[in-house]
Image: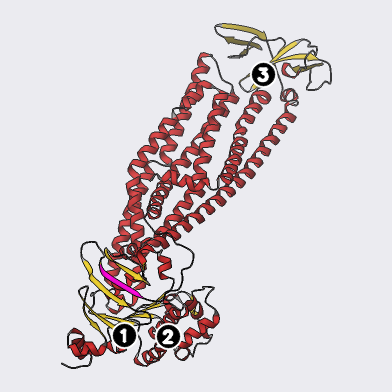
Amino acid sequence: MNVNRRLVRYAVEYKRTILAALLLLAISVGADLAGPFIAKTMINQHITGIEQTWYETAPHTRDAVPYRNAWYKREAYFQPGEPKGHPMTLVQVGSSFYFVDRALPFISDPKIKNNVLTVGEAGKSVRAPATRLTTAQLFDFYKPEVPKMWRLAGLYFALLALSTAFTYEQRFLLQVAANRILRDMRRDVFRQINRLPIRYFDSVPAGKIVSRITNDTETIRDFYMTILATVVSSAVTLVGIYVALFILNVSLALICLILLPIVVAWVYVYRRYAVTTNHRIRSLLSDINAMLNETISGIPVIRAFNRQKRTEEEFDELNNEFYKGQTKLLGINSATGFNLSNVLRQAFLIALISYFGWKALHLNGLISFGVLYAFVDYIGRLFQPVQQVVNQLANLEQARVSAERVFELLDMDGIDVVDGDIERYRGDVVFDDVYFSYDGKHDVLRGISFHAKQGQTVALIGHTGSGKSSIMNLLFRFYDPQKGRITIDGMDIGQLPRQHVRQHMGIVLQDPFLFTGSIATNVSLEDPKITREAVEAALTNVGADVSLAGLQNGWDEAVLEKGSTLSAGQRQLVSFARALAFNPAILVLDEATSSIDTETETVISEALDVLKRGRTTFIIAHRLSTIRGADLILVLDRGAIVERGTHDELIRKQGRYYQMHQLQQGRA
C-alpha cells in the first residue's frame, strides 16, 4: 500500500480545481518574487545609476538637467540618432557627489584630494579635476529619476495586490478541493464499515473505529488543506527564487544550491526519528477514544461498583503515554525546526557578504549594489519556504500515519452492498449438519440439523454458551458455517447476497437498540416502503398504544441515543413494532421478553399469537413459559441439539428440558 499514491489518487478526482489553484499559485509567487527585481532596478538605474557619463544636450529636452548654464542628459536616455554634446561624469565619494567635466573610462575605487578625483581599476588610475555638488544641484540630477521610481513603486504595489488576490483564490480553491476529497474519503470509510463482516466489530472497539473516521480523516484534511498548500507553495517559491538567483548572478546562485542537499538530508533525518513516534501517538489516541467511548457507555456500571478510581488510573496511564509521545515529538521538531533554519540563513548571508567583499577587494567582476540587495532579499525569502516545509514535517508525518490507518481499514476484505429485491420467502428453513467456529479452532455448533416449516414457531433453549444465538447469527448470514448448509425455501443462503437473505427477516434482540429520532422513525427506520399507517398499526399490535399512551407528542416523541428516556420494556415494544412493521417472512425473537415485566409480556404474547400466523418464528428464551406453544423446541448443550419436540413431548421424556421446567417451576 503506497500511501502517497493513494492520497494522490483521491486528489486526481479534483485535478482541475487543484491545477487551477496551482496555476494561480505560480502567478502569485511570480508576482511576489518580482519585488526584488524592481528594487534592483530602482537602485542600479535610478539611485546609483546617475554615476555614469552624461552629455550636453538641448535645453528643456526630456530627462535633461540644468547645470551651470548648460543642460545634460544621461547616456542611457538618449534616443538613437539624437546628437550628443560635451561629456561629463558624476562620481560618488563617500556621501558626496562630484562633477567631472570629462568622460571617465571607469569610476572604481574613487578618491578625492584637493578637488582632484582619482579612480583606479586593474592597476590603472585616472586623475581629473572635480567639483563637489550642493544638495540642490544633486537633487536636480535626481529629478528625472523620481517619476520613474514612482512608476516602479506603483508597479511593485500592483504586483503585491495581484499576489495577494491570487494567493487568496488559490488557497480557497485548495481548501474547496480538500473538503471535497475528505467528503469522498469519509463516504468511502463509512461505506466500508457497512461492508465489513460482523467479526470485525466483535474484535475492534467502537472508539477505535470512530477515531479512524473522525480524527484520522481530519488529520488527512489538514494534509490537503494546509500541508499540501504549504509544500506546493514552498516548492514553487523555491523554483522561482532559484530562477531569479541564476538570472542575477550564476556564481552566487551556485553557492545557494548547496541548500538543496541540506534540506533533503534534513527531511531524511527527521522522518527517521519521527515516523515511529507518530505511529505510537496515533495508536494511543485511538486507545484513548476507545476508552472514552467504553467509559461513557458503562458509566452506570462504573459508579455502581465504585470503579471511578481505577478507571481514572487507567485513563491517566494512557494519557501520560500520549503526553510522553507528544513531548518526544516536540523535542524532535525543536531540534530540526526554526533554530536550525535560522542558523542556515545566517550562514548563507555570511557566505554572500564574504563573496561580495572578496570581489570588492579584488575589483574583479564586482556586482552592483542592486544585485547585492536583490540577493540578500531572495536569500531571506529562500529560507521562508524551507522553514515552512520543515514546520509542516510533523503534520505531514501525522497525516501519512493517519492515511495508513484509514487505507488499512479501506483495504480490508468486505462484502459489497447489493441493491434489488428478492421474492418474499414462504419460510421453510433447514439446517443440514452445520458446524461453526468463531475462531476457526473451537466449534460452538456441532452437527446442527433441523427443519422449521412455514408458519411454525421454533424455540431454542439451553444454558448460556450452548449456541442458541450462534444459530441465529448463521441464519442472518452474519457469519457463514465452516461445514454444512442452510437453506430457505430450498435456496442455499450461502449462494445469495447477504442483503437479500435478510430482506424478509425481522429480529428483536434482548437489548434493543434505538436510534436518535422519534418513536415513529425508529419503527420505520425511515424506509419509504413503511407508511405511517403501517407504523401505527405495528405499534398498536404489540400493545405500545397502551404502554406509551402518556407520551406528550405521541409517536413523534423524541428518542435520545439508545432510547435512554424510555424504560426497558418500552424500548422492547418499539423494537417489536419495528420488526413487525417490515412484515418479515421469518421472525427471530432473541431473548426478546427477558427485560419485559409480566404484564407487558402478556400484552405482547397476545399480539404475537396473531402476528405469528403465516410466518416462521424462532424464539430464543430462558423462560420456558414463553415457549409452551412452540411447534418445535430444540434443546441445545455445548453446540449440539440434545433434545427436540413439543413441550408436552419433552415433558413426557423427563430429560434435560423436563429438569429445566421443574427448576423454573420451583420444584426440586
Q: Nearer the viewer, residue 552 or 450?
A: 450
Write down the quadrant of residue 599 in the picture. Answer: bottom left
Write down the quadrant of residue 610 in the picture. Answer: bottom left
From the image, tell me which residue sits under label 2. 611
Disc on the earlier residue, 2 or 3: 3
From the image, tell me which residue sits under label 1. 631
Write down the quadrant of residue 324 in the picture. Answer: bottom left
- Residue 99 visible in the picture: no
Specify the amino acid type for callout 3.
Glu
Secondary element under disc 3, as helix, strand or loop, is loop
501 relative to 385 in the view: left or right: left
The prevailing secondary structure element of the residues shown in magenta is strand
Query: Which residues are the magenta region?
Result: 426-434
Which mark identifies residue 76? none
Which mark identifies residue 51? 3
- Quadrant of the drawing holding the C terminus: bottom left
Residue drawn at 67 percent across, 20 percent down: 97
Secondary element under disc 2, as helix, strand or loop, is helix
Q: Which of 225 and 167 is in front in this view?
A: 225
Q: In this view, does 442 lie above or below 151?
A: below
